[in-house]
Image: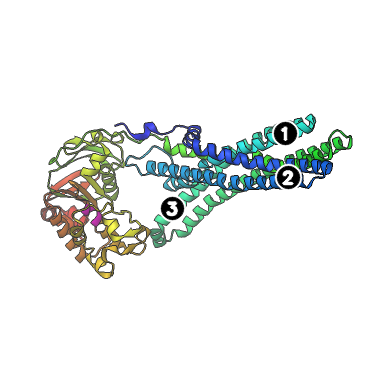
Amino acid sequence: MTTADEKRPRPGSDILRTALRRNVGAMAGGTVLMGLYQAGETAFPIALGLIVEHTMRDRSLGLLGVSIAALAVIITTVSLSWRFGMRVLQKANTTEAHRWRVRVAECGLQPVARDVDLKSGEVLTIATEDADQTADIIEVVPLLVSSLVAVLIAAVALGLADLRLGVLVIAGTVAILTVLSVMSRRIGSSTREQQARVARAGAKVADLIIGLRPLHGFGGNHAAFRSYRQVSTEAKHQAVTVAKVNGVYAGTALALNAVLAAAVTLTAGWLAFEGRINIGELVMAVGLAQFIMEPLKLFSEMPKYVMIARASAERMALVLTAPPVTTPGAERPAPGRGLEVDGVRHGALRKVRFRVAAGEFVAVAAYQPRAAADLAAVLALRVPPDAYEGAVRVGGRDLADLSVDAVREHLLVNPYDGEIFAGTLRTNIDPSGTSRLLAEAVEASMLTDVVALHREGLDHPVRDRGANLSGGQRQRLSLARALAADTDVLVLRDPTTAVDAVTEQLIARNVAELRRGRTTVVITSSPALLDVADRVLVLDDGVVTAEDTHRNLLATDEDYCLAVAR
């Protein structure tokens, strides 16, 4: 199947070019306005020099009034051009950062996983900090050009007064940029390493938050904290290194700029003393020498920001250019054909074979938890079809030949630890708002008591990860979501492990009734669910060793009795 990946940018440099290309209009407008700002700033000391020269020579009040009006125009131009120029550039920057955040999030949320060695926390950092720093290139280029305009205007103005002053400014600027461009490379490499370590620390935090309850349960929270502290300390040390490099860079830039300004001032003073420039030109030269430090500082910082933006773009490219783990097909499953697992060998599974007819309710009693997890992972497409032996067929078609959309419409595998999102009970059960079985799913999962507890009913707010719900309530909420989806084939893994025995009995009967005529597979050791199934498959040591109804197996299989008895 052809995916949108073919349209994605490739390396980090292409990401930067894409960002620049689609913001050409905003950057052009921003460059003109910021160029006007820098030209106005540069014109101010030039105007002062001319005013001093002509006022001393002509001593005309009318000319003084015109000069004051000219200064007012310059000041107004400087103020308005800066305000509107930065508004245009920052709007484009913010919009571009949003686009890249959405692109990275889209890649991370695609049904087919990407072959990238990054944890979810690292992807989160890339989708936020790196996207923002990449978009900064939208402001960097116009500011770079406008700073160059200021330096060139100053050089021309000084060159008209005396060629040596203009040459001194040009030569000094080239020397400063040469030194700083070399130093900026170190900043780029250090920043890439810092971003990687911060991302790893963020991923560790995400993992700890997810596993906080079980960590507290078996007393592993202290060891987990030590592990995070080590990762965070490494990120801190790298951040200190980057800060030192940035400090050296900023100090060097400031020192070089000050040396150039002092050189221009001293040269102008010497030329005035020699009588080669007049007092007005001296005032202009001294004013420009002071002013030129600001655009030179801005100009000299640009290579650093370019390297930071490039480092962030390269990290985004890790996600955007990563190939999918598998390439889905384009077919759709045939209706009324059920589910078939044919000789699957993966992890703890060894040549597993079974078939579930359309409309049948089958329970799989897995004696080893690892086998249950591997079977659920294969059915959920978390393991690509080419990564295991054998085949899984849905609607008579191999999973490898089906499109992702077709699989998602036809087959739903609900994990035992389904995620709960911030929102309401309703939005967690029916995110799209289109389910026809919302009320039935709530009743079948025995979530009715949770709804009845709250005045808002299904609109009761739910915190992120279901923090304001108990374990049993979260599990029933996840089950209600799976039932409300009403897919042709539903696979549930341990859907009742966190509820009491009475509730479990009611849920088992309700699920069997609601799913009547729909293909359902439950991977469980719950006697209540095993009892309502049409038949039970015993998965032991990676293979199906027995197949019968729950009650017949209880009567004939001692190992089965020991495995499922409570």
Q: Mark 1, residues whose alpha carbon is within 10 Å: few (<14), some, or many (≥20)?
A: many
Cα distance between the residues tagged 3 and 2: 63 Å
Per the image, the residue denoted by label 1 is: 155
User: Which mark lies nearer to you, 2 or 1?
Assistant: 2
| Real-space CA distance between mark 2 and mark 1, rounded to the nearest whole angstrom | 23 Å
Seen in the picture, residue 124 relative to 3 is either above or below; the reply is below
Rendered-image quadrant of the C terminus: bottom left
Q: Tag 1: residue type?
A: Ala
Are there few (<14), some (14-19), or many (20+) residues within 10 Å of tag 2? Answer: some
Q: Which residue is mark 3?
A: 206
Q: Amino acid at mark 2?
A: Ser
| Residue 561 figure quarter | bottom left
The secondary structure making up most of the magenta span is helix
Q: Secondary structure under badge 1?
A: helix
Q: Is residue 368 left or right of residue 40?
A: left
Q: Quadrant of the N terminus?
A: top left
Label 3 residue SS: helix
